[in-house]
Amino acid sequence: MNEIVLNQRFAEPFLRESLAYSPVVLLHGPRQCGKSTLAKMFGDKFGYAYFSFDNDLIRDAAQTDPMAFVDDLPERVIIDEVQRVPSLFTSLKRTVDRDRKPGRFLLTGSSNVLLVPKLSDSLAGRMAILRLHPFAQCELAGRPSDFLDRLFASDFPMTQVERLKTELSSRVVGGGYPPALQRPEGRIRDAWYRDYITTLVQRDIREISHIRSLEAMPGLIRVAAARTAQLFNLSDLASTFQLNRATIGDYLTLLENIFLVERLQPWHTNQTSRLIKTPKLHVGDTGLACAVLGHTSAGLHQNRTQLGPLLETFVYQELRRLASWHDQHHDFFHFRHKDGAEVDIVIERGANEIAGIEVKASATVTAADFRGLNKFKQACGDRFVAGVVLYDGELSIRFGPNLHALPLRWLWENP
């Protein structure tokens, strides 16, 4: 991999834009994905004071008298890890209702307040919400990617690029967490991930759930990592533990709440009844998944069976990261027909455009690899704009109208 850049986030212009129109902006995402760093960089540029609820004194003061705490804040302020004092949201609502001047409060959070109705409802219509992911590959290279616009324009000219080969597994194992990427692969990086999971379980999950017994949680994280990119099956997950389905379901919701896993919903249409309507499970970052599963980049390169689902998750998360700062909104799904045809990732842009992406770890592509995309194209009708098979090859080449085989590096490079 080329030298990485860890001080440039392509979400910053959208953060600045949101603060220009909204009195409160919440920047949320997994712990250690770079939220605090981005907030501080922004605050230094535009004169924001900074307070963190990871500081015991500040947190205790806010919990004791949240209204007085908010009243005493400077005119422009960053409040880091705001989910640690949930009562603050009501006080912020009262303050904002008195003065709706934009750009007053920049909040960061490591749990998804959208999944806590009382918190999200308290600032409904008053707060803009931005999702920050771990670093995308194009951010690490310091060069924006135009892949989504190329995809929806079906604009992939025939070109030849160098294969990724072992670099591909290195990128999958590396993931996008800044502190992990700053450590060499192996014992030092693995130790960081172990400490990271311990912190999440012992503090973050315990705080938002009030569940005393969380011994199964690290094991559930490993099982979810091993089954990433597979259809979600709660009974199958629960069978690994001596816990009932309801408990494992609650634990999985907690992992979703802190952005470690997510369920990718199936795409379907009323005109097609033979579609499987089960979501897929994806981990939030392949670096963490590989660490808990014990994968090295060299070992993963040799084990194509293990590489396949992790690569699919890697591509899915890359696309989600590209979409998070794009001007247009994108919705993500997967497609699976009862006859076995499937498309790994479906992306909708607006009401009339839809594209499909199939992910292959191999160095070659054949017409058979487009079976799922062709089935999906029929189901979409006029809404279908492009179908792409991403693979570890050299050639960008057309396989029919709006169907392309494309080297994986197109995700973060602009050949």
Image (cartoon, rainbow, N blue to C red):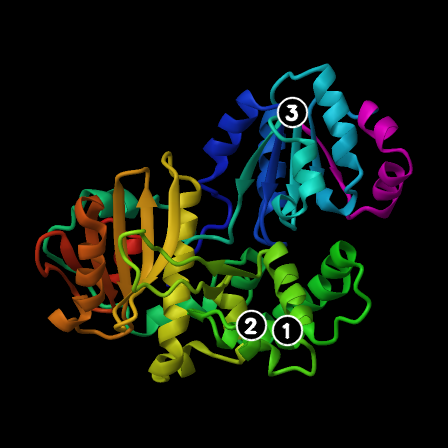
Identify which residue is drawn at 22% across, 66% down. Answer: 372
Mark 3 touching mark 1, by CB under 8 A?
no
Q: Is residue 56 visible?
A: yes
Magenta: main secondary structure: helix
**Mark sitting on residue 234:** 2
Q: In the rendered structure, does residue 70 fall within the stretch colored magenta?
A: yes
Looking at the image, which residue is at 16% across and 71% down?
365
Residue density around tag 2, few if under 14, some if 14–19, many if 20 or more, within 10 Å: some
Q: Which residue is mark 1?
A: 245
Please provide percent x and percent y for residue 316.
39, 59
The numbered mark, 3 or 1, whose residue comes first in the sequence reads 3
Mark 3 crowd level (few <14, some 14–19, many ≥20, 10 Å Cα): few
| Label whose residue precedes the other's in the sequence (3 or 2) | 3
Residue displayed at 69% across by 62% down:
200
* Residue 366 visible to an observer of this rendering: no
Q: Tell me, yes or no, whether the two marked residues, 1 and 2, touch with CB atoms within 8 Å.
A: yes
The N terminus - image quarter? bottom left
| Amino acid of disc 3 | Gly
Magenta stretch in the rendered image = 47-71
103 over 84 or under it: above or below = above
Disc 1 to disc 2, how far (Cα)? 7 Å
Which kind of residue does numbered mark 1 sit on?
Answer: Arg
Please tell me whether mark 3 sits on a helix, a strand or a loop: loop
The amino acid beneath tag 2 is: Leu
Q: Which mark is residue 47?
A: 3
Residue 59 at x, y percent in the picture: 83, 43
Give 309 or 48, whichever is nearer the viewer. 309
Q: Earlier in the sequence, mark 1 or mark 2?
A: 2
Q: CA distance from mark 3 to mark 1?
A: 49 Å
Examine the image and state in which quarter residue 158 appears.
bottom left
- Residue located at (74% from left, 75% from top): 215
